[in-house]
C-alpha cells in the first residue's frame, strides 16, 4: 500500500526511554503557529532533559490508519515510523480538542495493510433507478447491486488499478471495472433482466462502471491495528 502523499516530509523528535514523540516537521500546513510549535519542541526537550532523543520519519510505503477523517480534531492517527534502526507504530491522539496531538509509541502492535473493494450501494441503485424505472421492476436493480458487491468481494484488489484519488479522504481512490469483471456483471444482468432492456443494460454498464461512474469501484487502502503474533517456545 502506498504511503499517504506527503508523509515522507513528516518527522518527529522521539525519546526511546519514555516512548514519547513530538511533531518536528509537518507534511503540510501546520495547525500550530510557528511560535507555538517552537514552544512545544522546547517543552519536550526540557521534559526529556538527560535522555537520548532521536528523529522518526514515516516508513516508505508504510501502513497508516485513522480513526476518522483527517480534518476532525478528535481523530487518532497510527503510522509506521522508523528511527533508521527499527520500525514501530506511533500513535497520535489528544485528550481535549484544543490541544495538539500527543504521540506515543504503541508497543506490541503492528499495522497490517488491508485493501477493500467497495461499491456505493445507494449511489449505484439511484443511477439504476433513473435509467430503468420505466423498463424493469426495482427488485432487479437491488439484485444487480447485490451481485456487483459479491463480485467485488471475490476480486483480488491487486488486479484493480485506481485511476484517481478522493480529494478529502487519502485512503480512498476510484477505479473502473476491468473488462472481464464488467462482462461478468453484464452477463448476469442479461440472465436477470427482460430481453427488451439488454441493450440499455449494456450501455449502462459501459458508462457507469467507469472510474467516474455511479458504479465505480471504491478502493479503500487502510490498515488494521493488531497485536504482534507471539511465538511460543518450549524447553528442549
Image (cartoon, rainbow, N blue to C red):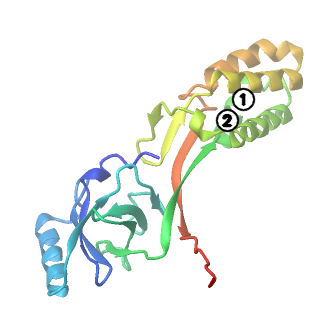
Total marks shown come to: 2
In the foreground, 82 or 115: 82
Say above or below: 233 vs 160. below
Q: Position of residue 4 (x, y in %)?
A: 38, 49
Residue 122's x, y, as percent? 67, 42
* Residue receiving disc 1: 128
Disc 1: CA contacts within 10 A as few (<14), some (14-19) or many (>=20): many
Q: Work out whether residue 25 or residue 74 is closer to the camera in this orientation and state it.
A: 25
Which residue: 32% across, 57% down? Answer: 58
SS of the residue under disc 2: helix
- Residue occupied by mark 2: 124
**Image quadrant of residue 235?**
bottom right
| 226 lies above or below 158 | below
Q: Residues within 10 Å of mark 2 (few under 14, many from 20)?
A: many
Residue 44: x %, y % from top left: 19, 80
The reply to whether callout 1 and callout 2 are in contact (CB within 8 Å) is yes
Amino acid at each position: 500500500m502506498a504511503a499517504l502523499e506527503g508523509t515522507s516530509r513528516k518527522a518527529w523528535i522521539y525519546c526511546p526511554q519514555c516512548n514519547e514523540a513530538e511533531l518536528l516537521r509537518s507534511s503540510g500546513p501546520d495547525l500550530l503557529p510557528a511560535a507555538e510549535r517552537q514552544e512545544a519542541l522546547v517543552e519536550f526537550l526540557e521534559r526529556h532533559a538527560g535522555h537520548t532523543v532521536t528523529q522518526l520519519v514515516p516508513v516508505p510505503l508504510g501502513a497508516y490508519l485513522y480513526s476518522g477523517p483527517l480534518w476532525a480534531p478528535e481523530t487518532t492517527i497510527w503510522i509506521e515510523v522508523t528511527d533508521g534502526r527499527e520500525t514501530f507504530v506511533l500513535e497520535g491522539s489528544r485528550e481535549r480538542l484544543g490541544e495538539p496531538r500527543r504521540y506515543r509509541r504503541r508497543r506490541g502492535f503492528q499495522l497490517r495493510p488491508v485493501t477493500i473493494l467497495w461499491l456505493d450501494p445507494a449511489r449505484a441503485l439511484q443511477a439504476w433507478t433513473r435509467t430503468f424505472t420505466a423498463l424493469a421492476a426495482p427488485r432487479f436493480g437491488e439484485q444487480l447491486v447485490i451481485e456487483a458487491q459479491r463480485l467485488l468481494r471475490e476480486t483480488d484488489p491487486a488486479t484493480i488499478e485506481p485511476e484517481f484519488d478522493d480529494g478529502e479522504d487519502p485512503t480512498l481512490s476510484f477505479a473502473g471495472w476491468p473488462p472481464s469483471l464488467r462482462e461478468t456483471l453484464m452477463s448476469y444482468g442479461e440472465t436477470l433482466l427482460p430481453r427488451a432492456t439488454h441493450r440499455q443494460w449494456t450501455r449502462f454498464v459501459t458508462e457507469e462502471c467507469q472510474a467516474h461512474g455511479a458504479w465505480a469501484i471504491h478502493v479503500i487502502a487502510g490498515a488494521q491495528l493488531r497485536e504482534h503474533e507471539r511465538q511460543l517456545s518450549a524447553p528442549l
